[in-house]
Amino acid sequence: MSTLKTVRIVEAADLDDIATGGAILGTGGGGDPYVGKLMAKEAIRRHGPVRLVDVEGFDDDALIAPVCMMGAPTVMTEKLPQGEEIVVALRKLEKFIGRKVDGLLCGEAGGINSTTPFVAAAATGLPLIDGDGMGRAFPELQMTTFGMCGVSATPMALADDKGNCVVLETIDNRWTERLARSCTVDMGGSALLAFYPMDGAKAKQSTVRGTLSLCAALGKTLRQARARHDDPVEAIRAALSAEIIFNGRVRDVLRRTVGGFARGEADIEGLDAFKGHRLRLAFQNEFLIAERDGETLVTTPDMISLLEAETGAPVTADAMRYGVRVAALAFPCAAAWRTLKGLELVGPRYFGYDLDYRAFSPA
Amino acid sequence: MIRIGIDVGGTNTDAVVMDGTQVLAGVKAATTADVMTGVVEALAQALAAARLAPGAIDAVMIGTTHFTNAVVQRRDLAPTAAVRLGLPATASLPPMVDWPDDLKAAIGGHAYLAHGGHEFDGREISALDEQELLAIADDIRAKNIRAVAISSVFSPVNTECETRARDILKKALPDVHFTLSSDIGRIGLLERENAAIMNACLCDLAKLVVDAFRNALDAAGVKARFYLTQNDGTLMDAAYAENFPVLTFASGPTNSIRGAAFLSGVSDAIVVDIGGTTSDVGALHKGFPRPATVAVEVGGVRTNFRMPDVFSFGLGGGSLVVDGPKGVSVGPRSVGYKLVSEALVFGGQTLTTSDIVAAAGRAEIGDPGKVAGLDPDLIARAEARIAQMLEAGVERSRLSAEPLPVIVVGGGSILVKGAIGGLEVLKPNHFAVANAVGAAIAQVSGEIDRVYSLASMSRAEAIKDATDKATAIAVSAGARAGTIEVVDVEDVPLAYLPGNATRVHVKVVGDLDVA
């Protein structure tokens, strides 16, 4: 443990930048980080700051556990957590394994889950690894680089607001997703979980590194661009080496709830340089496919982030409304996803689109 | 159609008389402690200036920043209890968790968590507990709290817990005001609850103010229809406004931005409205206030109203100027409507921004002799501080480096000395009464919020049906058919209802038919 390298000490005030960056990496989904941010701030105020560390410093046989929140984004802004769930889940997992956890890991750096690990880290005093298992947000829990590297999502513990706690042991990660999803729906649409327990060696191999610092850096970039009156969209584009694939106004959003997920399509009408053009975004919580004038431009797992055109504030698929002016940014996903195994897990065909993945490279 | 637009600010009550698109007269009177006297005075002056009899008026539109000012200044707020139904869920973030400490203290910070609420799929989270609510009622009575805001998890899709809890509490607390969060906001518990608590703490003030308006119109002999303007620049009936003062929160800035656009003929600009107590800065984009797309804060509290993107800060013609060990401070406290009696230049004892401007020789108000003795160094430092505050406010609303003009309106415009942060400043005709003009040209809306079964019709048909119905409502409320625009369409599938039920919300607005 003495070899652990601190990346930074995270205080309550740092959560604002992290939550903003988390919303950008959320690519339209992952939930509004506001609630997670408030909870993390409360936890840090009560228990003290969080130590963000480099995964490299853990012993190969250390026990690492990722934590996250699971459920529908709308539910999370309405039915706020009871507060103890995440610690209950973590302790239950430790009890089941028969060993204390040495370090925490973020399951998903996009959306609300960019902030939830800070709640667990502050409450337990455990170090939090700077990285995650997606490099963005994805709707299902088998969609992690951990799973791709052969880590089982189970044993896994889910806890709800009422004090219920479920431990799952499954035959594969798809079954984990399926069973955890039914539990979450029964638990009222949101649950906190500790899952993918792994040793230090696997954590080093499978973590998408540096994503929590990236969140903090993106938040800071946006904040500073606004203060300087630089174009905030351009500042974020530059920070991510992304491409602005569209500027326009939301014309229509078609939503339906299928199997607990918000699925839909948004139709955006071009403005400025894109006048006369149309962008169609398909989403299942996250934006997955961008099609400009009928031509497929970006496909999952490459990233599509929607920013409010003037302020650069990230716009979630949930918050998209008629008339909102947006800029669409596209940029490549974590390299680990651009593999046969990765695309099997998170490529367009997995989400039911009759499309092959085409690697996006920003102009 | 002859109509009167009245703007009741913290310091001045302005009135304009308009005939169609012509401004016949614009006048200013001081806001009075009882509100009514100031409105009567403004009405009488306006009618006299336009040479009209009270009977000639077809409609009166009142815009007021009274309620926003009360929250910003943390005054005249009733001690309020926030009762949230949802235990054991939601305990991690109790009511008012993200409020500024001083505002929480101003209304007592009474937060109660109780059982109740619904899951997303319509199940109860836990049963409502009558005994628990009665114990809360006892505590509320013992603390002499006069207003209660009730919020419940998922109340926008099922209001039952909130209405039942109100019925139980009301029996025990018959004289207390109740606001239900489901009457005010959308999904998003904290934001909806925040709006409900603010509405509840304004209940006493709302009765007082709306009564004063009513009495003032009676006293002036005006028998016309009487409206208040709300957040989005549209009109609401006065009786409705009395129960929902929170809906007027952004009407001041909306009116001033729309009034500034109307008066200046400019369609892209930054608008600074300087009143007696606060300054509001907003952006005019293609003739309309730029709407906020992220959660809007009012007095430091996050809400989910649809409002123009406006930044308010405590600088006005009545702002207190205090020289202390850390330098000179300006605002946020203001003498408000007492400017004409408390400011030095009017013979009072309090140093205000208006005194500084008068002493600097930039405005002819009151008796300049009364401020002749002010320290020139203090005047210079106070002027520098005022310029700094204005520049910071404009900078915050300016989202590009593009040099837009700044339209300055409102009675406190005398505080502006030349350009602001290098940007050209415009003061249109009638600039001092732009808010009242904005109120007079307020639009009429029609709104539909209902559940459609998509088993028998398509989504497009449902939205078209809602749009047609909303349009009919707007037209019958006085909107001219050709001007009607859809400003909001939202459809939310309700997964747990049979028949593919979807909640459709459509809002349309149109210009009041002034032909």
Image (tube, helix red, strand yellow):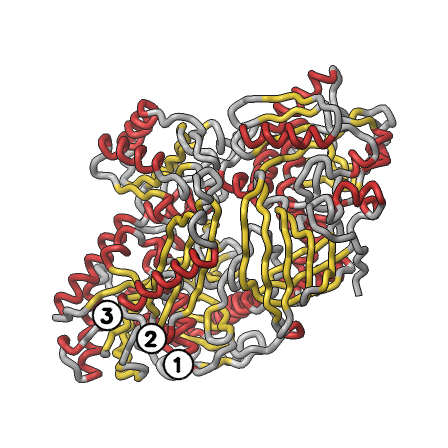
Reading the chain from its start, which is encountered first: label 3 or label 1? 3
The chain to which mark 3 is attached is B
First of labels 2, 3 by sequence position: 3
A358 lies left or right of B146: right
Local secondary structure at mark 1: helix
Real-space CA distance between mark 2 and mark 3, rounded to the nearest whole angstrom: 12 Å
Residues at marks 1 and 2, CA–CA distance in whole angstroms = 8 Å
Q: Are marks 1 and 2 in contact (CB under 8 Å)?
A: yes
User: Where is B312 relative to A126, above or below?
Assistant: below
In the rendered image, is residue A172 in sight?
Answer: yes
According to the picture, the residue beneath numbered tag 2 turns out to be: B437
Query: How many neighbours does mark 3 have within 10 angstroms: few (below 14), some (14-19), or many (20 or more)?
Result: many
Task: Say which of A22 and B46 sits in front.
Answer: A22
x and y, in percent, of residue B512 in the image: 31, 73
The reply to whether discs 2 and 3 touch (Cβ–Cβ < 8 Å) is no
Check disc 3 and give the amino acid type. Val
Mark 1: amino acid = Leu
Mark 3 = which residue? B60
**Tag 2 secondary structure:** helix
Q: Residue at x 40, y 37 (%)?
A: B152
Which numbered marker is on residue B405? none
- Give me the residue at 35% from left, 41% from top: B149
Q: Residues within 10 Å of mark 2 (few under 14, many from 20)?
A: many
Circle 2 marks a residue in which chain? B
Same subunit, tags 3 and 1 = yes
Q: Quadrant of the N terminus of chain B?
A: bottom left
Residue ID for mark 1: B263
The part of the image, by quadrant, that contains residue A179 is: top right
